[in-house]
Image: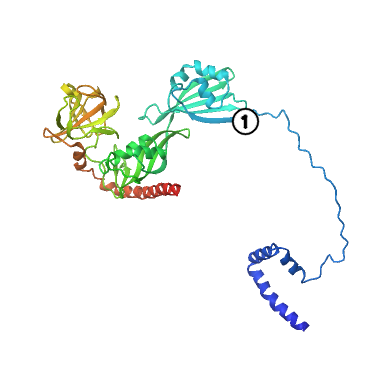
């Protein structure tokens, strides 16, 4: 009997030993779990062997222990090395005191300097949307204030106003530095309008206008948008000292309208003076004519019959009216030569641009004319500004497209104009860029879907 129990025990222990050698972590984890299973399991294991504490005398000793007192904090610990930082955007209503208060600064001397400094008054106070950063001491006294903004979109630089505390008091200076570009991903879903959707997604209006412009020949953003349409965008943001100062160009975009997907990619051939937008498979989106002489805006009167607002008679409206505030820049829709620039009857201030063949475009009711007869203009060049001169009841642009002297629907002409093909030599480089942008657009769309879930 005894030998049989020993043999049985050996047979039981041998596979356990082999398992421990092969899988020490698993066996250890299993043993730990078994020991934590409760008092019943622990008693069953303990009862396999003699109780080691049986017969021992157990004493219970109770003694109170005083907790250690916390170490006293020194009242004279220096806080000179502690700096507080806060950033905000300037507002049109900002005074020196209001701006510093919003930045968490309480410093009468600094406020007095800002009120009296000519560079601060000219470059910061009353200016809208300038990125401001304040560095203050632990006592909320101003050490350094920096404001950044883009003064000129063509230079690639930004301006930096610096106000610093010196041993002699506060001093200010204006610096110029280069902008840096980085890419951002964004996406959204249409609920009511394009701008409402981009605002909800934190996308700048300048980017939304570019998207509308890129897809203008494929999507009527005034009538064809549907609730549930979605978009994904990769765009540049231009930064100064790590602070975003201005939105740059849309690098790629995808817009799904009524279930149909439209894609665009900006590509500039090395050495070429300018780039253009293409579909991701290489089809050009740039046509000989833009669809509109203004950035995305509302059409107040289409190319159709209408009741004339002044003559109060029904007649054909042989152009398109775009509602916009006075001073809104007007651009030419295609390459050409200025044929006329001046005042003409009910048109008021008007510009005629002669394009290739017999095409002529007309830009009327302008508040300002920026070109002269005989001047060459390129597609997208600013030639004037919206106004209400001539027979106009409110600020708007009257735009006409004439072919052989006959007015035609401008939107139809733009859609029918031929596209500019991508150069064959640049196709391999374009394909590599398109593959990378596909990945980024998918990432932007997936972020939007994840946030919706």
At horizontal 23% and vertical 43% (from top left) the residue drawn is 420
Quadrant location of residue 232? Answer: top left
At horizontal 42% and vertical 46% (from top left) the residue drawn is 448
Tell me the crowding category of disc 1: few under 14, some 14 to 19, or many 20 or more residues within 10 angstroms, Cα based.
Answer: few
Answer with left or right where residue 216 lies relative to residue 50: left
* Quarter of the image with the N terminus in it: bottom right
SS under mark 1: loop
Label 1 sits on residue: 82
> Residue 110 appears at what percent x and percent y?
55, 20
Q: Residue furthest bottom?
A: 1
> Residue 65 appears at what percent x and percent y?
83, 45
Quadrant location of residue 394? Answer: top left
Of residue 438 and residue 299, the one placed in the foreground of this image is 299
Quadrant location of residue 35? Answer: bottom right
Of residue 276 and residue 391, the one placed in the foreground of this image is 391
Of residue 80 and residue 390, the one placed in the foreground of this image is 390
Of residue 279 and residue 362, the one placed in the foreground of this image is 362
At horizontal 74% and vertical 69% (from top left) the residue drawn is 44
> Residue 244 appears at what percent x and percent y?
44, 34
Relative to 22, say whether 77 is above or below.
above
Task: Evaluate whether residue 275 shows in this view.
Answer: no
Query: How many numbered discs?
Result: 1
> Residue 150 appears at what percent x and percent y?
41, 28
Task: Evaluate whether residue 404 shows in this view.
Answer: yes
Answer with left or right where residue 387 lies relative to residue 46: left
Answer with left or right where residue 97 lies relative to residue 48: left
């Amino acid at each position: 009997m005894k030998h049989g129990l020993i043999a049985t025990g050996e047979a039981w222990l041998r596979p356990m030993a082999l398992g421990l050698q092969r899988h020490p972590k698993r066996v250890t984890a299993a043993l730990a779990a078994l020991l934590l299973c409760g008092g019943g399991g622990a008693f069953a294991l303990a009862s396999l062997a003699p109780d080691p504490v049986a017969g021992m005398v157990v004493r219970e000793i109770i003694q109170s222990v005083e907790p250690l007192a916390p170490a006293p904090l020194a009242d004279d610990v220096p806080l000179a090395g502690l700096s507080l930082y806060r950033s905000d955007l300037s507002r049109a209503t900002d005074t020196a005191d209001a701006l510093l208060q919003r930045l968490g600064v309480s410093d009468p001397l600094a406020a007095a300097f800002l009120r009296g400094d000519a560079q601060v008054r000219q470059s910061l106070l009353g200016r809208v949307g300038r990125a401001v950063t304040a560095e203050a001491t632990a006592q909320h006294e101003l050490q350094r204030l920096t404001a950044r903004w883009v003064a000129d979109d063509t230079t690639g630089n930004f301006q930096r106003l610096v106000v610093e505390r010196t041993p002699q008091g506060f001093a200010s200076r204006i610096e110029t530095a280069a902008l840096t570009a980085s890419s951002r991903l964004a996406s959204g879903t249409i609920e009511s309008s394009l701008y409402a959707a981009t605002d909800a997604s934190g996308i700048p209006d300048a980017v939304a206008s570019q998207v509308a412009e890129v897809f203008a020949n494929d999507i009527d953003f005034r009538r064809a948008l549907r609730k549930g349409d979605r978009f994904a965008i990769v765009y540049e943001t231009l930064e100064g000292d790590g602070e975003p100062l201005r939105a740059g160009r849309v690098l790629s975009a995808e817009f799904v309208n009524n279930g149909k997907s439209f894609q665009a990619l900006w590509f500039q051939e090395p050495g070429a003076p300018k780039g253009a937008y293409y579909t991701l498979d290489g089809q050009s989106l740039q046509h000989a004519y833009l669809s509109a002489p203004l950035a995305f805006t509302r059409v107040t009167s289409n190319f159709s019959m209408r009741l004339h607002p002044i003559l109060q008679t029904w007649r054909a409206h042989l152009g398109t009216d775009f509602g916009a505030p006075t001073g809104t820049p007007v651009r030419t829709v295609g390459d050409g030569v200025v044929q006329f620039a001046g005042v003409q009857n009910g048109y008021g201030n008007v510009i005629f641009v002669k394009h290739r063949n017999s095409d002529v475009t007309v830009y009327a009711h302008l508040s300002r004319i920026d070109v002269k007869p005989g001047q060459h203009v390129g597609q997208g060049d600013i030639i004037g500004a919206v106004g209400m001169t001539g027979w106009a009841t409110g600020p708007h642009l009257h735009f006409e497209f004439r072919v052989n002297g006959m007015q035609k629907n401008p939107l139809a002409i733009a859609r029918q104009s031929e596209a500019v093909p991508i150069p064959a030599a640049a196709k391999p480089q374009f394909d590599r860029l398109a593959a990378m942008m596909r990945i980024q657009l998918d990432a932007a769309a997936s972020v939007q879907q994840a946030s919706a879930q």
